[in-house]
Image: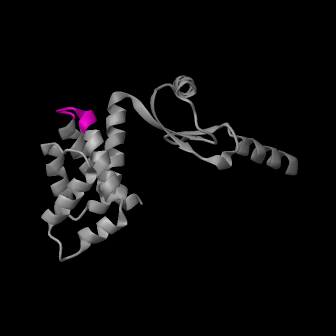
Amino acid sequence: MAELATVARPYAEALYQVARQGDVAVWVEQVSALAQVAENAELRQFAGSPKVSAEQVYDVVAAAAGVSLSTGVQHFLRTVIDNGRLAVLPAIAVQFNALVNAASGVADAAIFSAYPIEPAQLAEVVAALEQRFGRKLSVNVTLEPELIGGIRVVVGDEVLDTSVKARLERMKVALSA
């Protein structure tokens, strides 16, 4: 995994340098769409076939992305494909998003919840988490029923686990000690 990150870093940094000259949000949307497409194993197998040209791969990926690509993103995608790095595209997108977030003072937060969170509740939770972590958060909520109740929040390398599952595990450890 470290190898992917190492390969992705220069692409992400170069992409960010170009993107910040324009509308970064548009670039984030387009690169994220391309990354989702590049995660498809069948597409990567298609791209790796010696019978398929780089232009054909580009056409398929660009069409599958479902968004209109700006000229800069088109050039980026062609470079990635020409260099045989389509499999690295998701890692590039992750690092690119991290650079964008770092520049804007925002951190990604993954919220895992046992139950769906209503928008009003989510706004309250996000406000409390932003105060707790001391920075603006870009949240992604994922349902995880095995938590039983409560939430688990991951921001960078910090984890805040207030789930029932975590409390039960702590009780189990305390009782068995």
Depth check: give the residue in front, 3 or 125. Answer: 125
Q: Within the magenta stretch, is there residue 127?
A: no
Specify start and end residues of the magenta stretch as a single range.
20-26
**Which quadrant of the structure image shows residue 46?**
bottom left
Residue 162 location, quadrant: top right
Taking 81 as reference, is 120 left or right? Answer: right
Query: Which corner quadrant holds the N terminus?
Result: bottom left
Q: Which residue is pictured at 38% across the width and 28% down the height? A: 105
Q: Residue 165: where, in percent of width, then height?
A: 72, 45
Does 158 sit above or below residue 4? above
- Which residue appears farthest toward the bottom when viewing the image? 51
Nearer to the camera, 6 or 49: 49
- Looking at the image, residue 97 sits to the left or right of residue 112; the answer is left
Examine the structure image and report whether residue 21 is included in the region drawn in magenta. Answer: yes
On screen, residue 48 above or below 19: below
Q: Position of residue 43 (x, y in %)?
A: 30, 65
Q: Could you tell me if residue 38 is visible in this image?
A: yes
Q: Quadrant of residue 106?
A: top left
Q: Is residue 160 visible?
A: no
Where does the image place residue 83, in percent across and percent down from the top left? 19, 63
